[in-house]
Amino acid sequence: MTEALHSPSTQRVNQPGREEAVVRAGEHPVEHEQPEDWGWHGETGKWGQIGGWFSTAVILLYLVGNHEGRVEDIWLLALAGVMALVLIWDLRRKRTAWRR
């Protein structure tokens, strides 16, 4: 990287709200990149749902064990419940998205 800082074919450019950039001479730095430019569209699809339900099941399996207190059970049930609600909300959101 130090070669790029001192190379005559590059220049340093100040970017508002960001760090200083090193770009080729005559080029403009990237001002803003969208996640879609890199292939990410914010959806995990069916594998995200499968992974979410699998994780919820694993958390519920933690209820079986040798712990004596019930505080752990309350936390595990609450966490699994929140995860299940988010997964159900996500399923419903995906099914009704075309109507909006």
Image: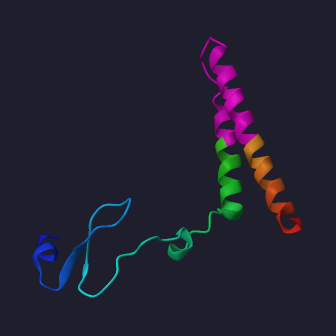
Q: Is residue 86 above or below residue 68?
A: below
Of residue 51 and residue 64, the one placed in the foreground of this image is: 51
The reply, left or right, for residue 22 in relation to residue 62 is: left
Find residue 49 and report its horizontal and vertical position in percent.
71, 55
Q: Which residue is farthest top? A: 68
Magenta residue check for 71:
yes
The reply, left or right, for residue 93 in relation to residue 6 is: right
Q: Which residue is pictured at 76% across the width and 53% down the height?
A: 90
Magenta residue check for 8:
no
Of residue 20 and residue 54, the one placed in the foreground of this image is: 20
Q: Is residue 88 above or below residue 76?
A: below
Q: Which residue is pictured at 85% across the width and 62% down the height?
A: 95
Q: Which residue is pictured at 27% across the width and 65% down the height?
A: 20
Specify the segment rendered in magenta: 56-84
Q: Which of the 4 quarters of the picture holds residue 18?
A: bottom left
Find residue 77 and report its horizontal and vertical position in percent.
71, 28
Q: Which of the 4 quarters of the picture holds residue 6?
A: bottom left
Of residue 46 and residue 5, the one placed in the foreground of this image is: 5
Image quadrant holding the C terminus, namely bottom right
Magenta stretch, overall SS: helix
Q: Which of the 4 quarters of the picture holds residue 92?
A: bottom right
Q: Which residue is pictured at 64% across the width and 39% down the height?
A: 58
The reply, left or right, for residue 11 in relation to residue 87 is: left
How many marks on residues?
0
Find residue 75 and report its horizontal and vertical position in percent.
65, 24
* Rendered image coloring scheme: rainbow
The reply, left or right, for residue 63 in relation to residue 15 is: right
Image quadrant holding the N terminus, namely bottom left
